Image: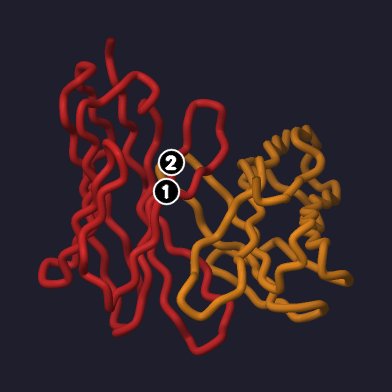
């Protein structure tokens, strides 16, 4: 196992409320990622981090923010949740090494915005 | 821009048949990585294989084999003698190397493989 946990695993919330999802790793890896998975779209990159306090936007970053104050934790925040953000959210980590780019994923968080 | 196309949305075969999942990619980078992931009904994403752009050697792992062809920008995945436990959604993904950057993965939309007993 890659040593990644996500919390909560399931969440139902209402439109307009803030939501924070947490990704925690025990591997001490530098790179961490947030993806969302929607039917017919595969997985799409939201934000990523390349170190503590170093983050950048991915393909579908609108409406999301992230923070990384410790190596082991990467937080994804929906400032004001909308129904279009109903999705399954996956966190991933990437082991070090120039010749390696594979990522290992957490178990996912199923978020429903009513 | 990068793109991964998995044209087969769903494939259904009978157990013990061989099945090939197609993956076609687009990238302008000369150094890149290709991956296959498996997502069983339980929902987790399982890493299966990575292939570097400079290594066109095909790979076999038990009943699984992968055929990487740069000439056709394809990275196809074959399961030999399929089993019910192979039923899952399979994703092909692409990543480029930007000299130390974080390089997220670009995923195809996935192929839902159904193995019927």
Image height check: is A98 above or below A28?
below
- The colour scheme used to paint the residues is by chain
Q: Residue at x 82, y 63 (%)?
A: A72
Image height check: is B12 above or below B3?
above
Image hue for chain B: red
Q: Which residue is mark 2?
A: B38
The percent coordinates of residue B110 (x first, y second) are 36, 44
The percent coordinates of residue B115 (x first, y second) are 29, 20
Q: Quadrant of the N terminus of chain A?
A: top right
| Quadrant assignment, res B72 | bottom left
Residue B59's mark? none
Of the two numbered discs 1 and 2 in the rendering, the one whose residue sits closer to the viewer: 1
Image height check: is B65 above or below A11?
below
Task: Please rate how many residues cluster around mark 1, counting C-alpha atoms within 10 Å: few if below 14, some from 14 to 19, many from 20.
Answer: some
Marks 1 and 2: same chain?
yes
The subunit carrying tag 2 is: B
Q: Which residue is mark 1?
A: B48
Q: Residue at x 39, y 54 (%)?
A: B49
Q: Residue at x 60, y 65 (%)?
A: A94
List the single residue furthest toward the top: B117
Q: Quadrant of the C terminus of chain A?
A: top right
Confirm or deny contact between disc 1 and disc 2 (CB under 8 A): yes
| Quadrant assignment, res B100 | bottom right
Image hue for chain A: orange
The percent coordinates of residue A46 (x first, y second) are 61, 63
Residue A9 vs residue A62, the one in the foreground: A9
Who comes first in sequence, dot 1 or dot 2? Answer: 2
The subunit carrying tag 1 is: B
The percent coordinates of residue A39 (x first, y second) are 46, 39
Residue B117 vs residue B60, the one in the foreground: B60
């Amino acid at each position: 196992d890659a040593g990644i946990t996500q919390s909560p695993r399931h969440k139902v919330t209402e439109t307009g409320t803030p939501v924070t999802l947490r990704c925690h790793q025990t591997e001490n890896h530098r790179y961490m990622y947030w993806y969302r998975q929607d039917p017919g779209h595969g997985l799409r990159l939201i934000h990523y981090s390349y170190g503590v306090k170093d983050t950048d936007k991915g393909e579908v970053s609108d409406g999301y923010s992230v923070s990384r104050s410790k190596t082991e934790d990467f937080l994804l925040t929906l400032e004001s949740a909308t129904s279009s953000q109903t999705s399954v959210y996956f966190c991933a980590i990437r082991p070090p090494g120039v010749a390696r780019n594979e990522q290992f994923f957490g178990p996912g968080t199923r978020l429903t915005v009513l | 821009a990068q793109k991964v196309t998995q044209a087969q949305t769903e494939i259904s075969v009978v157990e013990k048949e061989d099945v090939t999942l197609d993956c076609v990619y687009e990238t302008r980078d000369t150094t890149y990585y290709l991956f296959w992931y498996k997502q069983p009904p339980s929902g987790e994403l399982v890493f299966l294989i990575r292939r570097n752009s400079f290594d066109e050697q095909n790979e076999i792992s038990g009943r699984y084999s992968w055929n990487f062809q740069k000439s056709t920008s394809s990275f196809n995945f074959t399961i030999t003698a399929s089993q019910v436990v192979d039923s899952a959604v399979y994703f092909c993904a692409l990543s480029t190397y930007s000299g130390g950057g974080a390089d997220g993965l670009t995923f195809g939309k996935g192929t839902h493989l159904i193995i019927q007993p």
